[in-house]
C-alpha cells in the first residue's frame, strides 16, 4: 500500500470544536460532495445518544460529533448499513479512533464495506462509562466537556480502557480533526489518505500547516496513556493467569453474553456458544455432574470467555463496550485488552491500523509451513 | 389437604437436610440449587450429585443469577429424578416453557418457597448481601416489602409458587431461624418425603400475612407502572423509554420465555439491504442505525409478554437501565387479562394465543 504523508490545515473554531467539525461536514454535504453524514445524535428523551445517518442539513444541527458516551460501537452501526455490500451514496462517518479501527477490522472480515465511506476521526478524549452517563446525563455532559477543556486533557471521568488508550489520535482514517491545539479557537484538519486528499482538493484547502505543535501534544498524552496501560496490565495479570484466577475473576458472570453481543468484532450472527452444538443433552450433563460431584450453571462459563478471546482478540480494538454492557461489573475490557496486547504482539499485528494488512489467521506464509515441517520432523525424532 | 412437615432447624438448614436425605437415600440422582462459589458473595446454580456438595448450598438465598426455569428446561428430558429448589417465578417460567414444548417436568421434584424477592446484581457485585440479610429476613417474617429487593420483586404478586410439589413456607413465618415448615402438595412430594425425619401434620398452606403482603405488593406494582408511565404514551412514549436502547438484546437472552436459539431480530430476515436504507434516508432526511430499535421491543412484546412471569432479569441486565421488566409485566398482564390467563399457573391449560375457539372465527367473520 502506498504510504501517505499526513498534511493539515487550520480551521476556525470560534464556537467550539463541535461546531467547527459540524460546519465543515455541513459544507461538504451542501456542496454535494457527500450524500450523508454518519454521526451521533441525542435521542428524543435526551438521556443518551444514537447513531444517525443524516441527509437533511437541518438535522445535522442537532448532531454531536464528540458524544460523551459510546452506547453502540460505530463500526457495528456501519455494519448494519453495509453488511450486504456497498451502497450508492457517499457517506462521511465521523467516529472515535477505536470505532475507525473496528470498522477496518470488520471490512477485512467482510462485514463492512468502506468503498463509499469516508472515515473521519478526531483526537478522542475518551468516553464516559455508559452507566455513569445514563444515571445522570446532565452531569455526564458537564464532566465530559470538562475532560477535554483544559490544556492537558483530564481523562479521570472516562472509561478505564480510555484512560489507557494510546491509540486516541489519528487512526487509519481518511480525515482527522486535530483538537489538541494550544492556539486559541482553531483546530487542525488532517488529510490521511487518497480519499482525504480528494476532500482537500474539492474544498480547495491548502495543507501546508505546520503540525509539529499538535504532534508534540499528542505524543505527550500518549506517553501518559502508555504509562497507565502498563500499570493496568500489571494489575490485570494476576487476575487472568491460571484457571483458578480466571474462575475467580469471572465468578459473578451470569452468562448473558452481553459482552459478545455489543463487541464490534464478534460479528457472528449466532455465537457458537449460543448455538445448538453447545447445548449438551441431559444425559451428558448428569454424567459430567456425577463425575465431578457437581456442575455449575450456566455451563462453560470460562470456556465462553477464553473461546471469545481466541476468536476475536487479534482484532480487539479495546473500545470497552464489553465492560459497559456487563451487568455484574466484570472488567472485561481490561482483561481482553491485556490478552489482545499479547496475541497481537505475537503476530506483529495491530488491529485496525492498516487496512492493507491481512488478518494473521487469514493468510499463511511459506516459512510457517516450513516451521510445521520442522515440528513434525522433531516430533518424529 | 396439604401435608406439613416440620423440621427443628432453620428454614435453610431444614431444606438442605431434606435434600441430603434425598441424595443419600438415592431418591434423586441430583439436586439443583443455588450455591455459594466463593467467599466474596458469588453464587451460581449447581447440579449437585454428592451430599458433600450440599455444604455450599444456599437454596433460599435471595439472589437470582439466572432464571432456573430456563436452565432446567434446556436440559430436559431427564431420565433420572432430580430435585430442584427454585423461586416461584423460575418455576412459573419452567411451566410456561413446557407449555411451549421447550421441556418437560417429568422426573423433577419441584421445590419452591413463598418468596420475599431477590436483591439486584449490584448487591452481589458490591459484596453487600450478607449485610442486607438480617433486615431482609425480618421483612419476610413480617410479610413486608424489603426496600433492598429489585423493583420487579417489589411489585410481584406471584410470590407463592402455583404448582410446586413442595413449598417451604417463609412469608409470615416467625421462627425462620429455628423452624422449617415444608408443605407437601402433590403425591409426588409426599412419596419423596416418605421416611424423612420430621413432625407430620395436616395443614392448609397460607396465612393472613401472605394476603397482606399481596396487598402491599399490588400497591408497589401500581407505583411502578405509574413511575414508568408508558401505558398511555403511544409510540412517542415507546421512543422516549426505549430511545437509549443499545440493541444488545441481553433482555431476550436472559428471558426464560424467549427460547428461540436465534432471535428473529438477529436473523437474516432483519439484515437491512443498503439500497432500501438509502431510499429511506432520502425519504426521511435521517435514519437511525442500527434500525428497528422499537420494532425489536414491540416484536418481543408480541412474542413473549403473554407468558411473562415477571422474573425481572431483563431489567437487571439492561446496560441502559431501561425498566424493561415493568413495561413487559404491564403489557403481558393486560393481554393475559383479556384471556383470564395467568402465566405459569397450570401446565395443562393451553396458552390462549396457541389455540383457537370456533366462536372466535365467527367473531372475525362478523367484523
Image (tube, rainbow, N blue to C red):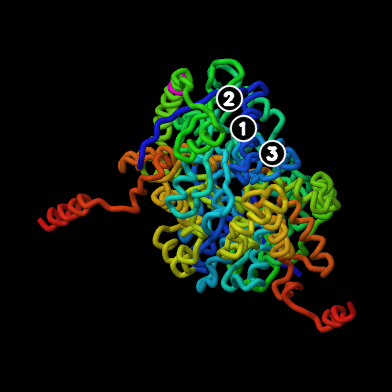
* Viewer-closest of B106 and A18: A18
* Viewer-closest of B135 and B252: B252
- What is the chain identity of the residue bearing mark 3? A
On the question of residue B174 being in view, the answer is no
Q: Which mark is residue A24?
A: 1
Q: CA distance from mark 3 to mark 1?
A: 11 Å
Task: Please report the residue visible at 75 percent of the width from the left and 58 percent of the height from the top.
Answer: B158
Q: Is residue B87 left or right of residue A179?
A: right
Mark 2 or mark 3: whose residue is earlier in sequence = 2
- The kind of secondary structure element at disc 2 is strand
The boundaries of the magenta stretch are A217-221
Q: CA distance from mark 1 to mark 2?
A: 9 Å
Task: Please report the residue visible at 50 percent of the width from the left and 40 percent of the height from the top.
Answer: A100
Q: Give the residue number, with chain letter if any, for mark 3.
A: A60
**Residue B240 appears at what percent x and percent y?**
76, 45
Q: Are marks 1 and 2 in contact (CB under 8 Å)?
A: yes
Q: Give the residue number, with chain letter if any, for mark 2.
A: A11
Q: Which mark is residue A111?
A: none
Q: Is residue B325 magenta?
A: no
* Viewer-closest of A226 and B217: A226
Q: Nearer the viewer, mark 2 or mark 3?
A: 2
Are labels 2 and 3 assigned to the same chain? yes
- The kind of secondary structure element at disc 3 is helix
Choose top left, top right, bottom left or bottom right for residue B253.
bottom right
Q: CA distance from mark 2 to mark 3?
A: 19 Å
Amino acid at each position: 500500500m502506498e504510504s501517505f504523508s499526513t498534511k493539515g490545515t487550520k480551521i476556525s473554531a470560534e464556537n467550539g470544536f463541535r461546531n467547527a467539525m459540524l460546519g465543515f461536514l455541513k459544507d461538504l454535504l451542501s456542496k454535494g460532495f457527500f450524500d450523508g453524514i454518519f454521526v451521533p445524535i441525542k435521542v428524543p428523551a435526551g438521556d443518551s445518544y444514537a447513531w444517525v445517518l443524516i441527509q437533511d442539513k437541518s438535522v445535522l444541527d442537532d448532531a454531536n460529533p464528540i458524544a460523551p458516551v459510546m452506547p453502540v460501537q460505530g463500526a457495528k452501526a456501519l455494519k448494519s448499513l453495509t453488511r450486504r455490500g456497498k451502497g450508492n451514496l457517499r457517506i462521511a462517518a465521523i467516529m472515535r479512533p477505536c470505532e475507525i479501527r473496528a470498522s477496518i477490522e470488520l471490512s477485512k472480515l467482510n462485514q463492512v464495506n468502506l468503498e463509499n465511506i469516508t472515515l473521519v476521526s478526531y483526537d478522542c478524549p475518551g468516553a464516559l462509562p455508559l452507566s455513569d452517563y445514563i444515571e445522570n446525563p446532565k452531569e455526564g455532559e458537564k464532566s465530559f466537556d470538562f475532560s477535554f477543556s483544559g490544556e492537558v486533557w483530564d481523562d479521570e471521568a472516562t472509561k478505564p480502557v480510555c484512560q489507557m488508550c494510546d491509540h486516541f489520535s489519528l487512526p487509519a482514517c481518511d480525515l482527522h480533526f486535530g483538537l489538541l491545539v494550544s492556539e486559541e479557537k482553531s483546530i487542525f484538519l488532517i488529510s490521511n489518505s487518497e480519499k482525504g486528499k480528494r476532500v482537500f482538493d474539492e474544498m480547495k484547502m491548502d495543507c501546508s500547516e505546520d503540525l509539529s505543535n499538535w504532534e508534540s501534544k499528542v505524543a505527550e498524552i500518549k506517553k501518559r496513556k502508555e504509562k497507565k496501560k502498563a500499570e493496568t496490565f500489571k494489575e490485570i495479570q494476576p487476575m487472568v493467569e491460571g484457571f483458578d484466577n480466571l474462575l475467580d475473576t469471572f465468578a459473578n458472570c451470569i452468562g448473558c453474553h452481553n459482552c459478545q453481543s455489543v463487541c464490534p468484532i464478534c460479528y457472528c450472527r449466532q455465537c457458537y456458544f449460543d448455538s445448538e452444538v453447545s447445548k449438551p443433552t441431559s444425559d451428558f450433563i448428569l454424567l459430567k455432574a456425577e463425575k465431578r460431584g457437581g456442575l455449575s450453571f450456566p455451563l462453560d462459563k470460562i470456556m465462553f470467555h477464553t473461546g471469545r478471546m481466541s476468536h476475536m482478540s487479534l482484532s480487539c480494538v479495546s473500545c470497552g463496550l464489553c465492560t459497559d454492557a456487563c451487568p455484574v461489573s466484570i472488567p472485561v475490557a481490561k482483561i481482553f485488552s491485556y490478552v489482545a496486547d499479547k496475541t497481537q504482539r505475537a503476530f506483529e499485528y495491530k488491529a485496525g491500523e492498516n487496512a492493507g494488512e491481512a488478518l494473521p489467521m487469514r493468510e499463511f506464509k511459506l516459512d510457517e509451513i516450513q516451521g510445521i515441517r520442522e515440528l513434525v520432523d522433531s516430533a518424529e525424532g | 389437604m396439604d401435608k406439613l412437615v416440620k423440621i427443628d432447624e432453620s428454614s435453610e438448614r431444614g431444606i438442605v437436610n431434606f435434600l441430603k436425605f434425598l441424595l443419600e437415600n438415592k431418591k434423586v440422582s441430583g439436586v439443583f440449587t443455588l450455591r455459594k462459589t466463593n467467599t466474596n458473595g458469588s453464587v451460581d446454580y449447581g447440579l449437585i450429585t454428592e451430599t458433600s456438595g450440599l455444604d455450599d448450598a444456599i437454596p433460599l438465598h435471595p439472589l437470582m443469577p439466572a432464571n432456573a426455569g430456563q436452565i432446567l428446561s434446556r436440559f430436559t428430558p431427564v431420565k433420572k429424578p432430580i430435585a430442584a429448589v427454585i423461586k416461584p417465578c423460575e418455576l412459573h417460567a419452567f411451566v410456561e416453557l413446557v407449555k411451549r414444548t421447550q421441556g418437560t417436568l417429568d422426573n423433577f421434584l419441584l421445590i419452591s418457597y413463598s418468596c420475599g424477592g431477590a436483591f439486584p446484581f449490584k448487591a452481589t457485585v458490591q459484596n453487600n448481601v450478607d449485610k442486607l440479610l438480617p433486615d431482609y429476613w425480618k421483612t419476610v417474617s413480617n410479610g413486608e416489602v424489603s426496600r433492598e429487593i429489585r423493583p420487579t420483586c417489589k411489585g410481584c404478586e406471584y410470590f407463592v409458587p402455583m404448582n410446586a410439589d413442595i413449598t417451604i413456607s417463609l412469608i409470615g413465618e416467625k421462627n425462620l431461624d429455628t423452624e422449617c415448615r415444608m408443605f407437601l402438595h402433590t403425591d409426588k412430594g409426599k412419596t419423596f418425603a416418605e421416611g424423612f425425619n420430621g413432625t407430620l401434620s395436616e395443614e392448609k398452606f397460607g396465612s393472613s400475612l401472605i394476603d397482606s403482603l399481596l396487598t402491599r405488593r399490588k400497591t408497589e406494582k401500581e407505583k411502578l407502572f405509574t413511575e414508568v408511565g408508558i401505558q398511555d404514551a403511544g409510540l412517542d412514549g415507546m421512543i422516549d423509554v426505549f430511545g437509549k436502547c443499545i440493541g444488545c438484546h441481553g433482555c431476550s437472552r436472559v428471558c426464560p420465555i424467549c427460547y428461540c436459539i436465534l432471535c428473529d431480530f438477529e436473523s437474516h430476515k432483519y439484515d437491512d439491504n443498503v439500497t432500501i436504507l438509502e431510499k429511506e434516508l432520502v425519504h426521511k432526511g435521517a435514519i437511525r442505525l442500527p434500525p428497528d430499535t422499537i420494532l425489536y421491543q414491540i416484536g418481543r412484546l408480541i412474542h413473549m409478554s403473554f407468558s411473562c412471569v415477571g422474573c425481572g432479569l431483563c431489567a437487571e441486565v439492561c446496560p441502559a437501565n431501561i425498566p424493561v421488566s415493568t413495561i413487559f409485566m404491564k403489557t403481558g398482564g393486560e393481554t393475559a387479562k383479556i384471556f383470564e390467563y395467568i402465566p405459569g399457573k397450570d401446565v395443562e391449560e393451553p396458552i390462549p394465543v396457541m389455540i383457537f375457539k370456533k366462536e372466535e372465527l365467527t367473531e372475525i367473520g362478523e367484523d
